Image (tube, rainbow, N blue to C red):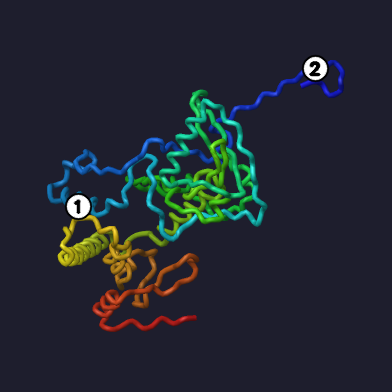
Amino acid sequence: MNDMDGGNGDEFEYEGNEIHFEDYAHELSFLPDLTVPASTILDYESPNVKNPALDPIAQLKLVETMRRHEEIMIASGNALPPPAYGVVCDIEVRGHAPIKQRARRIPLKYLRRLYELLKGLLEAGLIAFSSSPWASPIVIVLKKNGQDIRLRIDYKMVNAITLIMEYAMPLVDDLLTEMESYLWFCSLDVASGFWAMMMMMRARWVSAFVCALGRFEWLRMPFGLKNVPMIYQRMIDNALWGYVQPKGGWEAFAQRMKNAEAKALALRKEFMAISGRSPTSARPALQTKYEADHPLMELINSPAADMFTVSENHTNQSWPRCSIGDHSSTTPVAVGLRSMSAWKHSTGSWPDSPSVG
């Protein structure tokens, strides 16, 4: 660039900085590699299923349980999980005008790679073609070796105007302090947990991204948006709300679960005898989730359902209640006729109607 003063004619050269993974770590949404389909094929003879420590009867029960729940299992890697019930992802931009950025140039040597990544996402149902007025660009991020690349979406401008969700995130130090007195603990990693949450229409439009191959929007919650960690943590906390320890100890809890499973199996056998199906087969596709979980719902809605305690004294039997959304308010649990009968059988009388007010 020539000197603007027209003096000595010095020239200055400005070189663009390379973006690495460490830069804008929380502002970029990576495009996962779904070029190789991750089909879910269950091998019941694999070493992680066949346990020599189990007796043949226990091994058979394990395989039967897995066969009944085949539809909720996904392959390892970037497989798309079934959508979660009762939770969605929304992006509140406080009425801000759509931010439309133009697509950044992508070298031709990387264009084929981009096409394969987008094709895999479209086939998996994670993204769709979009006509949104919003547009965030795709950027190329170099891996640590300086040669391989990852494609990511730059959501810095979208995150700057997004209303932050005020939700307390757990601290690692607090978790370590709570585990200091335990000899054994278990850590569970949810497979593709973010992708289990559907996007609201407004969030889909705000999440739109643009590249040389077109404009797309997310159908499932992606990484890189401002509030997605809080949304996911809130879902996990709500799922585990109130759980401290089973009433009566773990042995009593295990016995209750065995009784519930035995009753569920008896009901399933009765249903299968009428329909002519095997009791260990997976549920038919037309059977709803509620119908499949009805024995469990009966256990939850029964008088003995309050199996978790936080050291309060429960001396009276009252209408069962549950917390919905705001944990400070309670609403009556809707119980079915079968659960009402169980209540009468255990208490000798029908429950009083709950007061409203």
What residue would you read off at disc 1? 64
Q: Quadrant of residue 15?
A: top right
Q: Amino acid at mark 2?
A: Asp
From the viewer's perspective, tell me whether residue 74 is left or right of residue 327: left
Q: Residues within 10 Å of mark 2 (few under 14, many from 20)?
A: few
* In the depicted structure, whether residue 199 falls above or below residue 257: above
What residue would you read off at disc 2? 10
Q: Which residue is found at the position 57% from the left and 41% from the top?
A: 210
Q: Quadrant of the N terminus?
A: top right
* In the depicted structure, whether residue 62 falls above or below residue 35: below
Mark 1 secondary-structure assignment: helix
Coordinates of residue 315 in the picture (x, y in percent): 34, 75
The residue sitting at the top extreme is 8
Is residue 225 visible from the viewing direction of this image?
yes
The residue sitting at the left extreme is 56
> Mark 2, mark 1: which one is toward the viewer?
2
* In the depicted structure, whether residue 258 falls above or below residue 10: below
